[in-house]
Image (spheres, rainbow, N blue to C red):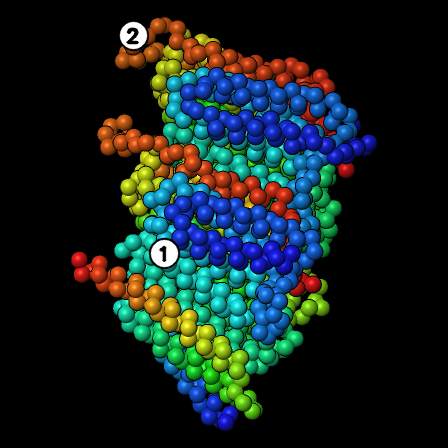
Amino acid sequence: MTDVLVLLVLLPLAGAVVAALVPARAVVGLVVAVAQLALGVVAAAAVLRDGPVLGELGGWAQPLGIGLRLDGPGAAVGLLSGVVVLAVAAHAAAVPAATGGPGYWPLVLVTVAGLQTVLVADDWFTTYVALELLTVGAVGLVALGGRRAYEPAVRYLCVAVLGSFAYLVAVALVYARTGPLALHDGAAAMPPGAATATVLGLVVVGLGLKSALFPLHAWLPAAHAAAPAAVSPLLSALVVKGSLVVLLRVWTGLGGDAHLGTLVGLLGGLAVLVGGVAAVRQERLKRLVAYSTVAQVGYVVLLVPLVTPSLLDPTDAAAADVARLAWQGGMLILLAHGLAKAAAFLAAGTLVQVAGGDRVADLRGIAARAPVVVMTFGVAGVALAGLPPSLAFVGKWQLLTAAVAGGAWWAVLVLLVGGLLTAAAVARVVATALRRPDDDEDDAPAAGAPVPRRVALPALTLAVLAIGAGVGSAWLADLTLVGTGVGT
Amino acid sequence: MIGSGTEVQASWIPPVILLTSLVPALVIFLLREEQRRARTVLNLAGALAKVGLVAVLVPPVLAGQRFEWRVPFVPGTDLVLRVEPFALYFLGLSAFLWLLTTIYAIGYLREGRDRSRFFGFFSLCVVATSGIALSGNLVTFVVFYELLTLATYPLVAHEQTAAALRGARTYLAYTLAGGVALLLGAVWLTALVGPVEFAASGSAAVGELAERDPATARLLFALLLVGLAVKAALVPLHGWLPRAMVAPAPVSALLHAVAVVKAGVFGIVLLVDDVFGAEVAQRLGVLGPLTVLACVTILWGSVRALRQDGLKARLAYSTVSQVAYVTLGVAVAGATATTGGVVHIVHQGLMKITLFFCAGLLASTLGLTRVSELSGVGRRMPLTCAAFTVGALGMIGVPPVAGYVTKWYLGLGALEAGAGWVLAVLVASSLLNAAYFGPVVARMWWGTPAPEQDLPRPRRAEGPWAMVGPTLVTAGASVVVVLVAGLPFSPLAMARAIVEGGAP
Amino acid sequence: MTARADLFLVLGAVVTLLGAVRLLTTADLLRRVVALNVAGVGTLLVLVALAARGPGDPDPVLHALALTGIVITVAVTGLALVLVRRVEEDDGD
């Protein structure tokens, strides 16, 4: 199984090199995407069956070597990455204009390699390097958006690297205190106290910057909106998740901190509300979708304060139940958001192209020309709002149950209001798209060519998956717990 | 008849019932606009299969058999679909009326646009309604209840005009907000007592909670009720219903007779009888306020209906009033009143769908949408107007149309329960019903058409048979259900069986 | 040894903070890149100071971390400068 972990990293890396050299880049991209998904399935099945998969890169032992460990959340996000990358690659292959240029394919594969390294890395320092790889790939992808994208790309780069510095200091602090350290297991070496709180604080700020956790989110809407149509889905669905997974791993690995946990939860709550309101008010379609990502990051970190009591007192059975529910709920929301947001961004990209403008108002009546794409956006929106029977609803149910059982009524309120805000933002877009010109108006949109099936299908598949995966998702919820030590 | 000797068996039947409308829905979405024949065949095959399945299930279920299907939803909680008498009762209504409405809609939309989308969501709406009927626990109910909201939005917005989208937005805002209350109530209750299974005389765990912590139990009842009351259009949460009138006639018919509004009251019946149990609810003291709320809704809806000139608007306010009868029945409690409420689910469905079918016929063949335009229309569309008259008389409570049976049981039940004042409300409501339906009927048959309405149309102007046929069938059915009330499988007999099975 | 290391630790933290604040408050892209490098220097200072805090020789692993950090920062700065130049070229058009 260790080979699978190594392959998960090396395959996209090798693919990136090949894609940079050969002319048939899209083919390379698609082949790697398919192989990536297959590897992801194999790895997830192994983790679900036997627990976390361990390994060492090149056979070097710690502290010099690179420790590998694929836990449940890593495997689940890897699976998500397999599905999303394949769908986005299919879309990109069908619409070359959506890629932003020939640099797209190597950059996508570098980014995927970065993400996979983040997911399988087990030591603090490898994770740092992997996060930088992820960042550089993602920034390069944003820059493909052309002249309007350069400035957001620089902004994104500076903020993300600043976040890395904070993380690096945290790594040094941990190392100076305890020596080489596996990411997943530091609670014994770092007892609760000021030092642990400092490390956690630095990690929250650093990875919060990279994940666009409110109030460190200002860079995200600009960067994700300016990126090409086949890039935004990857950024929102996957790149943001990489740093988020590390944040959660560090949190559970070091055993958390009560006050800081509450603070993170409150920031998450504010993110849901601020991101939700901003999405409702956006005039531009892609910014609307991007602000919803800010809100969704907030949903996920709501699990932090609910998990923390159990981390601090592992003997408390009631707290352990709450922690398990909250963890599963938050992780399912993370996965559901990945599927739904990728679908929403792909659909939004197509709509912008068909409408010839990215204002919501430009979409008026577009349902007549691109009915399937509008439907995709609507279905993805249902999943984003966490309405049944979507996967996000299952996650929301879990998280709500945890919040009620843990007495976190503010989190309950946030979850409920946040869903309504997302629904309002999506409903506005769908209603505009449906609006048929009155009979006495003659500014009927010129009937352009219909959107071909191979363009519309990848996004629709993701959206339907985001809805359908909710039924019978108990295995996925179980997978997210494997090897995390939450609620045990 | 039901209470003892029930036998639950795991079965694929419940999901197959959903598939009879889910498969047509998904295939229809994939059809091209001009594949009219394929769409019609799929629609009718699905609807007929569902009616057939329900018919086959009635005898074994009334004999005590239960068919159940479970799939894990979240660790520790299952999605449960279960065929039991009340489920089958609601399912039967929706299957029967879906079949007729589909035929009607095919006629109504014969030259319409976006028919694949329409019929796709139409079928999806039936999936949701069937799921609500079959729900075996609270989570399952919430899932399908919200799915219904989503599936009906595109139907309400079907015309895609500014007015249609406004109406649809209002509908969505009300129902999603209601959904939030329902979700909170369901999650909270589940967090306190574990997965809440619907049981004949209330969930035992919920009963214990009511003993232990009556204040929280009351709050939870209120939360769940608010969520259900939005769809059930209880005053003051009824505002969406008149505005959703922008929907095409078959959608309005379905919304008012089987799908949305009925899902709301069906949920209220479940909440009172199968979640809390009538006795527990009585002890908590929540039924008194619910009775008052139902009575206020009955009167307020009728008063508002009086002043509407738009025919569909008048019918909409009439629905607000009539559907509250069901709530009234369970709120008054006691076997007789509850039977009256439960039987009204079917009776109101038959009568109201007839009225909406007629409104659609009048609008689509002669372009008449206002009460004031209907003078003398009975001479041009006698069949339609006859059907309308039957429905209107039933609403007023004139025998032998279905409405009077309901009012009889409700009145009797109110007296048994010692709530004589409810009788006054029923009488007042009947007078108001007569006041807003009487003039419409009178105008149809005996009014003189305004001169500008003498357009060069044939004197007889009935709509196509695909529309008139279902209208006559539902009108006939609202009389037949009363004539056969004594037979074993009549709605009244089923309602009695459901209530007696639920009584401790 | 430790006292002087602590001084550098505080100094590193202050420099990092100054760089970070400037980075987050300025709109000019080139200033941002410079501020990022200031923050980077501060961070490396913290790392080296931490390495020198313990008894005995400075910890080589932390120096290795610092070196990797330098390499990555240089690479990232290069990327950032390319993008900044493109923005300015466009503005010049």
Task: Give the residue at x 71% y 27%.
Answer: B496
In the rendered image, residue B375, in percent from the top left (x then y), is placed at: 37, 14
Q: Assign a secondary structure to mark 2.
A: loop
Badge 2 is on which residue? B456
Task: Give the residue at x 61% y 77%.
Answer: A190
Q: Residue furthest right?
A: B5
Q: Is residue A295 visible?
A: no
Q: Which of the pair A131/A386 is nearer the observer? A: A131
Q: Is residue A120 visible?
A: yes
Q: Is residue A309 above or below residue A477?
A: below
Tell me where residue C83 sits by quadrant: bottom left
Q: Is residue A69 above or below residue B464?
A: below
Say what amino acid the circle numbered 1 marks.
Val
Q: Which of the pair A126/B423 is nearer the observer? A: A126
Task: Give the residue at x 49% y 76%.
Answer: C65
Badge 1 is on which residue? A142
In the rendered image, residue A460, in percent from the top left (x then y), is placed at: 46, 39
Q: Assign a secondary structure to mark 1.
A: helix
- Left or right: A475 as drawn, with respect to B252: right
- Left or right: B457 as drawn, with respect to C68: left
